[in-house]
Image (spheres, rainbow, N blue to C red):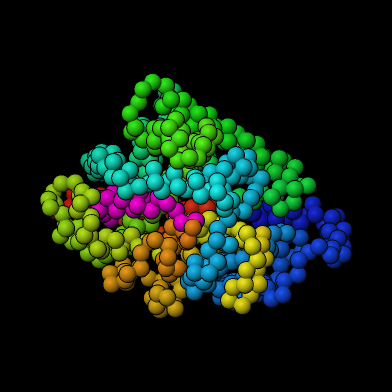
C-alpha cells in the first residue's frame, strides 16, 4: 500500500518536472549506450518499473521473468535493476563474474542507519569489506566459536520446552511464531552480548528495537532516487523514523560495549571477542568503536529474523504435511541415544531427514527471497547481454527454488525426500541452492544459524505432538507472507501441543 501511494505521489509531484527531465535526457551525450541490453518490460515515465515490483516483489518478478526471461533489466525510477531468476544464470555469475557482482548499492537510508554502509553486510566491495568479513569468519563464526556456545543453546532450548509445557497445562495453543522469535532473540543476545535484553526495568527490549529496525528495510526512500525530492521523506515522517531508530540502536550498542569495557572480563561473547581484537590488534586491521558496534548490529539484523522465519516455515510445512512430521520424528528418535532426553548436537549429525526438511524449507521459503541487493562494479557480458557498471542486481532465489528445470514438475510441493540423495549443499558454489547467498557475499554465519534451527526443531518434534489451532482458509491464510527484506508468515502460527508418546 505504501509503495503504491508513494509511487502515485511521485507521479503527481514530478509531472511539472517531467518535460524538462525528458528533454535533458534526450540531449544528454554522456549517457552510456548499451549495445545489447537484457529484455526490459515497458515502464512508466519517471518511475519506470516501480509498480511492477508489487507488494511481494519476489512473486511479481517471477511472473515477469516467465514472460521476459531469466535475465531482465528493469528501471527503479532512474536506477537500472538487473533481475536474475534462474540457476543457470546465477551459476555463470559464480564462475565468471563473481567479483563484478560483489558490491552493494549505496543509499541515503543506509548512510544514516549503518554509518554510511560501514557494516559488513552492506559495505561496498573492497579491502574494508574483506577485513570485516575476515573477522566474522575467523573470530565470530569459526567452528570453535560456534561450539563454545553449546551450553547456551541447550539452556535456551530447554527454556523453550518449559514454555510449551506450560501452554499444555493451561490447554492454550502455543504461539510458535512468538516462541521462535523469543528463542532466537534470547539466544543471540546471550551469544553476542552476554545476556538477555528482553525488556523490564532498566533493560531495553532488543526484540522491539529489532522489529522497528526491520520495518525500515524494504521501504521506498524517495531521496535515493530523486535527491531533490528528499523533503517528501521528511513529510512522510520516514526521515524522522530513521533518525530516531538510528539513535536508539546506537545508544543501546554503546551501552553494551561500555558495560563490556568496564572491569576485567573473560571472553564469553562476541563483544568480548571484538574488544580483545581491538586491544591486541591481532588482525592488523584497526577496529574503532563504530566498526565494533556495526559488527554486533549485523549479527542481530542477519540472524534473528531469518532464523525465526526458517523455523516458522518449517513448522508450517510439517503441520501441513503430518506424514513428513512423522518421518522426521522417526529419524530423530532413530539417531538419538536417549529418546526421553534433550536431543544433542552429536545426535543431529546423522539425522538426514532433519537436514532434508531444513533444505526443503529453505528452497520453498527462503528468509530473504531476493537475497541482499548487489551492484555491478564493472561492465559485464552475461548470456550474450551487456550490462553496465552501477546497475543494481536482484537475485530472485524464490523463483529459482521453483524452477521445474531444476526441481522437477513437483517443484511447488513440499517434499524433503528430494534432498536425501542430493549432494547439493548450502555453501554457495552450486547456484541451484543458495539460500544464504552466493560467491564472495555469501553469509558467513551459516553454521551458526543451522545448528540453532536444527536443534530446536528436533527437540520440538520429538518431545511434542502438534495440531494446528485454527483451520486455515485455504493456502492463502496458511502460507500468507509478510513484506520486507526478510519474509516470514503474515499471521502468527498457532498450534496445540501435547506430550509425544
Rendering coords of residue 169 (x, y %)? 22, 41
The quadrant holding residue 194 is: top left
Q: Is residue 471 visible?
A: no
Magenta segment's dominant SS is helix
Rendering coords of residue 330 (x, y %)? 18, 61
Q: Is residue 465 above or below residue 323?
A: above
| Residue 458 forms part of the magenta stretch | yes
Q: Which of 429 and 489 is in front in this view?
A: 429
Q: Can residue 398 be seen in this view?
A: yes
- Left or right of residue 256: residue 390: right
Residue ID at (48%, 65%): 398
Residue ID at (45%, 47%): 134
Residue ID at (12%, 50%): 338
Rendering coords of residue 49 (x, y %)? 68, 64
Which range of residues does the magenta coloring cover? 441-467
Q: Which of 100 and 107 is in front in this view?
A: 100
| Residue 303 forms part of the magenta stretch | no
Amino acid at each position: 500500500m505504501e509503495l503504491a501511494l508513494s509511487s502515485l505521489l511521485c507521479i503527481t509531484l514530478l509531472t511539472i518536472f517531467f518535460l524538462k527531465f525528458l528533454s535533458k535526457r534526450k540531449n544528454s551525450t554522456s549517457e552510456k549506450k548499451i549495445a545489447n541490453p537484457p529484455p526490459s518490460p515497458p515502464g512508466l515515465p519517471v518511475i519506470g518499473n516501480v509498480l511492477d515490483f508489487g507488494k511481494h516483489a519476489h512473486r511479481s518478478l517471477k511472473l515477469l521473468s516467465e514472460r521476459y526471461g531469466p535475465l531482465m533489466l528493469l528501471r527503479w525510477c532512474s536506477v537500472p535493476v538487473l533481475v536474475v531468476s534462474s540457476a543457470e544464470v546465477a551459476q555463470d555469475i559464480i564462475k565468471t563474474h563473481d567479483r563484478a557482482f560483489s558490491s552493494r548499492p549505496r543509499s541515503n537510508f543506509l548512510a544514516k542507519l549503518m554509518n554510511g554502509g560501514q557494516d559488513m553486510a552492506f559495505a561496498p566491495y573492497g579491502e574494508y569489506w574483506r577485513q570485516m568479513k575476515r573477522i566474522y569468519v575467523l573470530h565470530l563464526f569459526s567452528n570453535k566459536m560456534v561450539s563454545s556456545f553449546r551450553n547456551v543453546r541447550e539452556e535456551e532450548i530447554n527454556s523453550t520446552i518449559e514454555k510449551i509445557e506450560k501452554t499444555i497445562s493451561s490447554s492454550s495453543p502455543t504461539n510458535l511464531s512468538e516462541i521462535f522469535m523469543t528463542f532466537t532473540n534470547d539466544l543471540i543476545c546471550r551469544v553476542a552480548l552476554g545476556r538477555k535484553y528482553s525488556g523490564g526495568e532498566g533493560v531495553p527490549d532488543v526484540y522491539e528495537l529489532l522489529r522497528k529496525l526491520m520495518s525500515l528495510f524494504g521501504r521506498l526512500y524517495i531521496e535515493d532516487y530523486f535527491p531533490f525530492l528528499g523533503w517528501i521523506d521528511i513529510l512522510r515522517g520516514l526521515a524522522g523514523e530513521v533518525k530516531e531508530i538510528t539513535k536508539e540502536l546506537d545508544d543501546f550498542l554503546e551501552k553494551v560495549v561500555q558495560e563490556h569495557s568496564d572491569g576485567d572480563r573473560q571472553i564469553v561473547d562476541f563483544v568480548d571477542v571484538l574488544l580483545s581484537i581491538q586491544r591486541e590488534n591481532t588482525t592488523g586491521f584497526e577496529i574503532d568503536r563504530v566498526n565494533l558496534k556495526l559488527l554486533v548490529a549485523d549479527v542481530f539484523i542477519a540472524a534473528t529474523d531469518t532464523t525465526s522465519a526458517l523455523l516458522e516455515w518449517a513448522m508450517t510445512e510439517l503441520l501441513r504435511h503430518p506424514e513428513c512430521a512423522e518421518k522426521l520424528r522417526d529419524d530423530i528418535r532413530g539417531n538419538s541415544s536417549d529418546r526421553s532426553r534433550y536431543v544433542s548436537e552429536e545426535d543431529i549429525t546423522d539425522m538426514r531427514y532433519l537436514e532434508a526438511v531444513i533444505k526443503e524449507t529453505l528452497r520453498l521459503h527462503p528468509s530473504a527471497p531476493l537475497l541482499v541487493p548487489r551492484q555491478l562494479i564493472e561492465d559485464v557480458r552475461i548470456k550474450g547481454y551487456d550490462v553496465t557498471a552501477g546497475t543494481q542486481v536482484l537475485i530472485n532465489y524464490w523463483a529459482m527454488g521453483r524452477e521445474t528445470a531444476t526441481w522437477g514438475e513437483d517443484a511447488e510441493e513440499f517434499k524433503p525426500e528430494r534432498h536425501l540423495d542430493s549432494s547439493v549443499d548450502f555453501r554457495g558454489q552450486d547456484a541451484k541452492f543458495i539460500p544464504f547467498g552466493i560467491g564472495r557475499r555469501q553469509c558467513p554465519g551459516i553454521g551458526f544459524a543451522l545448528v540453532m534451527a536444527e536443534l530446536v526443531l528436533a527437540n520440538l518434534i520429538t518431545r511434542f505432538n502438534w495440531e494446528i489451532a485454527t483451520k486455515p482458509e485455504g493456502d492463502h491464510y496458511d502460507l500468507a507472507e509478510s513484506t520486507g527484506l526478510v519474509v516470514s508468515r503474515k499471521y502468527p502460527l498457532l498450534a496445540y501441543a501435547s506430550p509425544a508418546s
